[in-house]
Amino acid sequence: MKKNVLKLLLVLPALSILTGCTPATNSPLEPNENTPSSPVLPDEGETDIVDEESPIDYITLSDREIIVKVGKKSSTPIVNFYPASVPSELHDVTWEIEDTSIATVDQYGRVSGVKKGKTNLVCTTVSGHRKAKAFVEVINTDEDLTYEYQKVTDYTSIAAGDIIVLACPEKNMTATLENKGMYLHAVNSTFSSDKSKLLSLGENTIEFMVDGSTNNFTLETQTGKLLATTNEKKVTFVNKVGNVRWAFTNYEGNLYIESTSNVPGWIMYNDQDPRFANYESNASSVLYFPSVYRLTRV
């Protein structure tokens, strides 16, 4: 599904952050594709409720971010079930707002603004316990919102509540939800001619919700899973929370997205086989550091 980003008012569709890629200089150190992958599991006892026998693999919401004015109500988000073969009798969901002093939600998923602030909308399947989240911002009645995706140049400004996308603007690529077991597939997206803005997202581009603090971030997908690495330095997703942390650092003008858990390495884009993966090597003629674009109010 492609998204054209120009102006967004009241209920804002999915927002994203992206950054451009800069090629590195050393030869790439590829992950070992033949080595079994074992995720870096977070602390025990901090898990989402997941029924591994459920026919529902995951769910997503049509709106990744919802903007609503105080005293007003949003429309009902569309819940997408995967795989598409999930029977309709399993499509029942419940809705919850994490901070009800900011907003409330009815049984249909419509969000009402209570006071200015930010919180999250959580959708949970009645059968299967799969979850998806949307960021909620309540604004005052006299505010109008215009957003555009702008390139992030100060990586220290990335903070909890941001929604970001991994991208390589030099190659017009963004990371998608498709996980190959050791890397993230790449898809064509549209950037401005000077690469300062992202104009549209390729189909199923991952929109990560950032949580945590500097050097200690979690990156959560639309499907409620956390980006993680394995002991073999592969990229994967986990349902648990805990010791799965990332840092955004700027070194010699390049963005390093580093794992701060017990598995070293940073995410890079491989142009030889278009994908985003976890590497220990520096950039090369085929490996690029990612860049970030943030949806910014203008």
Image (tube, grey):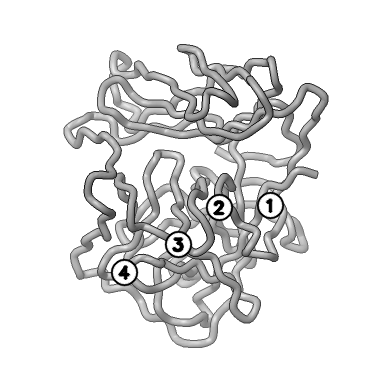
Badge 3 marks a residue whose secondary structure is strand
Taking 35 as reference, is 60 left or right? Answer: right
> Label 2 vs label 3: CA separation?
14 Å
Badge 4 marks a residue whose secondary structure is loop
Q: Position of residue 181 (x, y in %)?
A: 30, 57
For disc 2, the marked residue is 165
Front tag of 4 and 1: 4
- Please say if 5 is above or below 104: below
Front tag of 2 and 1: 2
Query: Which residue is drawn at the image coordinates 63% and 39% (left, top)?
Result: 3
> Label 4 vs label 2: CA separation?
24 Å
Quarter occupied by residue 20: bottom right
Label 1: how many residues lie within 10 Å, few (<14), some (14-19) or many (20+)? many
Front tag of 2 and 3: 3
Q: Are marks 2 and 1 in contact (CB under 8 Å)?
A: yes
For disc 3, the marked residue is 246
Badge 2 marks a residue whose secondary structure is loop
| Residue type for callout 3 | Trp
Query: Which residue is drawn at the image coordinates 42% and 33% (left, top)?
Result: 132
Q: Which mark is residue 112?
A: none
Q: Which mark is residue 198?
A: 1
Q: Position of residue 129 (x, y in %)?
A: 29, 28
Label 2: how many residues lie within 10 Å, few (<14), some (14-19) or many (20+)? many
Of residues 142 and 31, which is closer to you in this image?
A: 142
Question: Tag 1 or tag 3, which sits nearer the N-term?
Answer: 1
For disc 4, the marked residue is 262
Query: Which residue is drawn at the image coordinates 62% and 60% (left, top)?
Result: 292
- Please say if 176 is above or below 286: above
Of residues 31 and 108, which is closer to you in this image?
A: 108
